[in-house]
Amino acid sequence: MAKAKAKKKEEPKKLVIVESPSKAKTINKYLGTDYVVLASKGHLIDLPKSKLGVDIEKNFEPQYIPIRGKASIIKELKKAAQKAQAVYLAADPDREGEAIGWHIRNFLSTLEAVPVIYRLRLNEITKSAIEEAIKSPSEVDLNMVNAQQARRVLDRLVGYGISPLLWKNIRRGLSAGRVQSVALRLIYEREKEIEGFKPVEYWTLEADFTMEDGRVIRTKLAKIDGEKPDLKTQAETQALIERIRTADFKVSALLHRDKSKKPPMPFTTSKLQQEAYKQLRFGARKTMSIAQGLYEGIEIGEAAPVGLITYMRTDSKRVSPDAKAEASKFIGQAYGEKYLGPGDRDTSSKGKIQDAHEAIRPTSVFRTPEQMKAFLAPEQFKLYQLIWEDFLASQMSNALYRETSVEIGGSNVVFRATGTDTVFDGFTKVYEEAADEDRKGAAEGEEGGEVGANKLSGIVEGQKALWKEPVPEQHFTQPPPRYTDASMV
C-alpha cells in the first residue's frame, strides 16, 4: 500500500494588528495572503474600573489589568502571534495608538516563542503608504506611551476625586475629568459674565448720498469735529442731524489700497472640528467619527477599500513634498499656472505640538469630491469636500483685492463708504473659511466700516454729494456669546 503523501508544512505568516475591523479589512486586501490582519477593537489593557488603579506612593505608577470582555481578543492575538514570523503593531499613529501597541507588545513578550515585534505608523491607508511602512518599520515610542499614561493617570486622579462629589450632591453616574472639569469652569465663568452684563445704549448714523453721476452710495458716520463719533442718546443723534441738515457735502478724501489675502493653512484636528461646525453644523464627535471612516477606507470600485484622507488626529500643519507636488499638478491642470501657490510656504510646526504626522488632507487630490460622491454617504461627502477644498486652497495663490474708501465731508462732519473689488480670486476660487460666529457684527460700531455693496469706481475728490434723510439707529452693547461647539474647541 502506497504511503500517504506528507502534508506540506504551512509557512509562518506575518501578523498585523490594528485597532478597528474596518481598517483591518482594508489593509488585509492590500497585503495579500502572506499576512494575517487582526483588530484589537480598541484598548485591551487599562486601569481597573472598581478602584483608583494608581499607586500614588510609588511615583503614580498605573496598575493595569485586561479590560473586561477583551480576554477572547487577547487570547486570539497571542495564538496568532505564536505562529507568526513577525508581528506589526499598526494601531493609530497617536498617543492612544502607541499605548495600545505597547500593551500588546508587553503581553506578546511573555509567549514561549516571542516573535519579532515592529511598530507601523500609517498616516494614510493607501497601498503605497502601507507598503512603504512595511519596508521601514520602527519601534514603539516610549515617550508617546508615557504621554498617554500621564494623561490617563490625570484623568483617573481628577475623575475619582471629583465624581463621588457629583454623585453625592447632584446625581449618581455623572463623571468628571481633566477636560470636562475645565470646560465646565469656562462655561460657568462665561455664564456669570452674561448674567452680570449691563447693556449700554449707543447710536449709529448712516446716510445715503446721491453723487453727480446719479448713483446713490450708503455711508456711515466716521468723524465729528475730527473725533470718532460717540453718540449715546437719541437726543445727541438728533442734534447732530439738525446741525448738518443744511450743510454742503463733497468728497473730501479718496483712498485706494491694494490688499492680498493668504490661503488657509491645511486642517489640524481642532481647525477641522471648528470649520465642520461652522459650515456643516457637525459636532466635534460627529466630525471625528465621519473622518475616522474616511481614513480607514471606503469602497470606491477598486480592488480594495481606499483611505480617502490622512490621519485625522493631528496638530501639525506639515504637508509631505509628494502631496504638495500632486496638488501643484492638479491646480495647474484645473485652473492654470497663475493659481499655483509659491511652493515654499512655511507649514512647519511651531510651539509645543506633536509633529508625528501630517496635516489632514486627501490622500490624492485627483480623487475629487464629485468623483467620490457616488461612493459616500451624504455626510461623508460633505466632510470630504470640506477637507479636499481646504487642502487644495492651502496650496494655491493669494487672493488680491482693491479697497476703495471715500470720505464725504460737510460742516466738519465726515461720512465714509468703503467698497472692495476682487482683482484676482486666487484660492477663493476653491474655498473660503467660514466667518467666526462669535465675532459677527463685532465691526458694527467700528469707524468707517464697510457698508452695503457700494460701487465706488469713478468717484473723484472734490465731487459734490447730495445727502438724503439720514438713518439713525439705536443699539445696545451685547454680552459675550455663549460657547458654540466651535468656539469651545
Image (tube, rainbow, N blue to C red):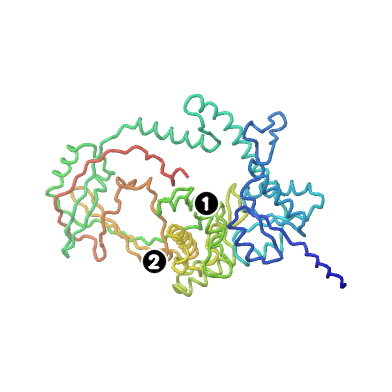
Report the disc number at residue 112: none
Q: Nearer the viewer, residue 195 or 223?
A: 195
Say which amino acid is labelled 1: Thr
Residue located 71% across and 62% down the image: 136
Quick one: 237 or 186, which is closer to the camera?
A: 186
In this rendering, the count of numbered labels is 2
Q: Position of residue 369 (x, y in %)?
A: 45, 65
Residue 449 on image: x %, y %: 30, 51
Q: Which residue is identified by label 2?
A: 425
Image location of residue 463, percent across then percent down = 19, 61
| Vertical relation: 224 (above or below) 264 | above
Residue at disc 2, secondary structure? loop
418 or 77, nearer to the observer: 77
Dot 1 falls on a residue whose secondary structure is: helix
Q: CA distance from mark 2 to mark 1?
A: 27 Å
Quarter of the view holding residue 49: top right
**Quadrant of the rendering where the N terminus is positioned:** bottom right
Residue visible at 63% across and 66% down in the picture: 30
Tell which circle, 2 or 1, labels the residue nearer the N-terminal end.
1
Choose top left, top right, bottom left or bottom right for residue 3.
bottom right
Q: Position of residue 428 (x, y in %)?
A: 40, 63
Q: Residues within 10 Å of mark 1 (few under 14, many from 20)?
A: many
Tell whether label 1 touches label 2 (CB within 8 Å).
no
The residue depicted at 14 percent of the width and 50 percent of the height is 469
Q: Amino acid at mark 2?
A: Asp
- Residue indicated by mark 1: 269
Q: Quadrant of residue 192?
A: top left
Q: Is residue 330 above or below residue 291?
A: below
Q: Nearer the viewer, mark 2 or mark 1?
A: 1
